[in-house]
Amino acid sequence: MNSFYSQHAGCVVRWHDLPGQGDPVVFIHGLGCASSYEYPRVVCDPRFGSRRAILIDLPGSGYSDKPECYRYRTSDQAQVVVELLNHLHIDAFWLYGHSMGGSIAIETAALTQNRILGLIVSEPNFHAGGGMFSRAIAAQDEQSFIIRGFSALLSAETSPWAGCLQSNAPHAVWRGATALVEGIQPDWSEHFLALSCPVTLLFGEHSLPDAEAEEMQQQGVTVMIIPDAGHSMSWENPSALAQALSACVSGG
């Protein structure tokens, strides 16, 4: 695992740089997740095509530091991703983000439009208001969530999400969830539709029908469906996700 010091977050950020062919695919994880936990099965799948992959654990998550004096908003996390790209001197890359990571990826893409080759997002937050988990977290105050809410959330979770959730700092989870509920202006959907690079939206088969998927399809965005999966597609059907990402990067 590699590391660098993020001036923006004021902490050490860690990532995997897995060797492979072509321009790298950079992976950004969602709320309460960690790329080091979530994506190795995807990028090691033969359907991914032996491409170079960069798996970043955002501040507050996984192996990265978890500073107290950091806001953990999507805009801040996007700045950290840009710092890493600059640190690695990457001039051309593909970007994938899931859920909250999709929103972060949209903001990262807007900051790197002269370098990004294409953006793929899976079930991101396009608008303020959050999802089921982020709304429930943000409905508590920060100290209550840190003292009681986080342990209650962790003990109630039976999916593989529990494994990476326990590697996250409670204050980072609460602040990230609150950022999703509050949103940004203009919202993520407007930034997404304004991008000049190719964009693709992924949805799990079990997450459909979905109004945002229909909205983006009407706007001309390519929507790909991951079969036999819902929101947590990276562990529900990692091989199908690997194939979809490879198709996007290959242009078909």
Image (cartoon, grey):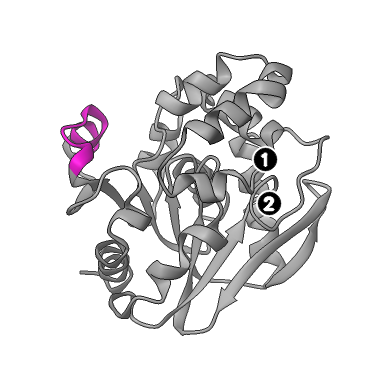
Q: Amino acid type of disc 1?
A: Asp
Q: Is residue 89 above or below residue 123?
A: below
Residue 80: give its label: 2
Quadrant housing the N terminus = bottom right
- The range drawn in magenta is 206-216
How far apart marks 1 and 2 lie (CA) works out to 7 Å
Q: Is residue 186 visible?
A: no
User: In terms of secondary structure, where does tag 2 sit?
Assistant: helix
Q: Is residue 72 left or right of residue 161?
A: right
Q: Is 128 colored magenta in this rendering?
A: no
Residue 70 image position (x, y, % from top left): 77, 36
Q: Which residue is mark 1?
A: 76
Q: Is 212 colored magenta in this rendering?
A: yes
Residue 68 image position (x, y, % from top left): 81, 36
Q: Is residue 225 left or right of residue 30?
A: left
Q: Is residue 140 visible?
A: yes
Residue 54 image position (x, y, % from top left): 55, 69
At x 19% / y 41%, what residue is drawn? 206
Q: Amino acid type of disc 2?
A: Val
User: In terms of secondary structure, where does tag 1 sit?
Assistant: helix
Kindly indicate the quadrant of the structure image that contains residue 219.
top left
Determine contact: label 1, label 2, CB under 8 Å.
yes
At x 64% / y 64%, what residue is drawn? 85
Q: In front here: 63 or 71?
A: 63
Q: Is residue 24 left or right of residue 45?
A: right
Main secondary structure of the magenta stretch: helix
